[in-house]
Image: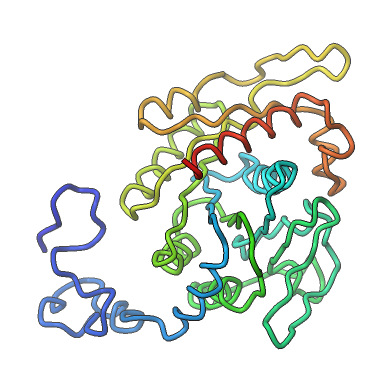
Amino acid sequence: MEKTEGSESATATGCPSETELAGKARMCEGCPGQALCRQQGGRDPDQEVLDTRMKAIKHKILILSGKGGVGKSSVAACLSMALAELSQKVGVVDLDICGPSIPKLLAVEGREVINSQWGWKPLISPHHDVKVMSVGSLLEQSDNAVIWRGPRKTALIKRFLKDTYWGRLDVLICDTPPGTSDEHLTVVKAMKSTNPDGAVIVTTPQEVAIATIRKELNFCRKMGVRVIGIVENMSGYVCPCCQERTDIFSSGAGERLAIEYSVPFLGRIPIDQHLVQCCEEGSSIFQSHPQSPAASALLQVAQAVMQEITR
């Protein structure tokens, strides 16, 4: 079928995928996605409740990375604390269903989520009162494997957004798994009508990571998700003795990619021994080592993010 003007559109001209005729209209005949649209098309009956929850939150930010191992969840957790340091009321929803690490990073591991008459009550982190919801807090044992197919993941993500009593927040950070799969498509579609602010892309300085991040940027373009900016994580090693910074990997790839795609570059976060220790212990670097290079870098990234989403 003919695509809409420009190759950035993910649907064909006149595609009824967002209507009650999804998968049933005459133009759907012969489309390879007809069966899927017939099952999932039309307006979600829970969308109105979900929209009400999300409209009480000023800013919604996705944390994305096309590649695993770049420290995306660590950046998401630390960014939430940095934003709280800037007097923002912050929540974090962990959409990495199969590999949740936010409970450990924000020190809510082992605590039980309570289901109240208003919905699931998010856990409150001891660090800056950040609200947290994660599948890791719903498991009987933290090391239990979550072996789910796409539809169950999709249903749980919608429940995190719709059934969690987030209340009024300044910022909700959505930590997603690596790649561009069910979790990403679900959260983008679910938040579409509540105007999410966009995505922060996390990368490391190596060219092999940058090659994969390009796919994530193209995903954002096709799905109509604004790229708030790129963060280069693990950018150099800071000596704990003399504070000298050494580039272990190559340097500047994140900034070059931002220039290539004409998106903001939000900053570099170094490998700092204090930050590594805080992530391992689930403590806050802003409370234990506020003058460290990593804490300063994270605050600069948080300020850059706020500047982008409030302008």
145 or 132, which is in the foreground? 132
Q: Which quadrant is the N terminus positioned in? A: bottom left
Q: How many marks?
A: 0
Image coordinates for residue 206, horizontal then vertical, percent: 54, 26
- Pick the residue in front: 42 or 69: 42
Q: What residue is shown at x 82% (from left), y 72% (from top)?
A: 141
Render colour scheme: rainbow
Residue 287 figure quarter: top right
Q: Nearer the viewer, residue 43 or 109?
A: 43
Q: Please tell me which residue is depicted at 39% across the width and 51% down the height of the picture.
A: 225
* Residue located at (36% from left, 27% from top): 260
Residue shown at 14%/57% (left/top)?
3
Is 220 on the left-hand or right-hand side of 78? left
Picture coordinates of residue 292, whole percent (x, y) = 81, 26
Please state if 54 lies on the left or on the right of 3 as rendered: right
User: Is 94 left, or right, of 286 in this rendering?
Assistant: left
| Residue 203 picture quarter | top right
Counting from the top left corner in percent of width and height, residue 93 is at 64, 62
Q: Is residue 182 above or below residue 238?
A: below
- Vertical position of residue 23 compared to residue 76: above or below: below
- Image: 67 above or below 264: below
On the rendered structure, is 160 left or right of 260? right
Measured as percent of width and height from the top left, residue 59 is found at 54, 55
Q: Is residue 11 above or below residue 281?
A: below
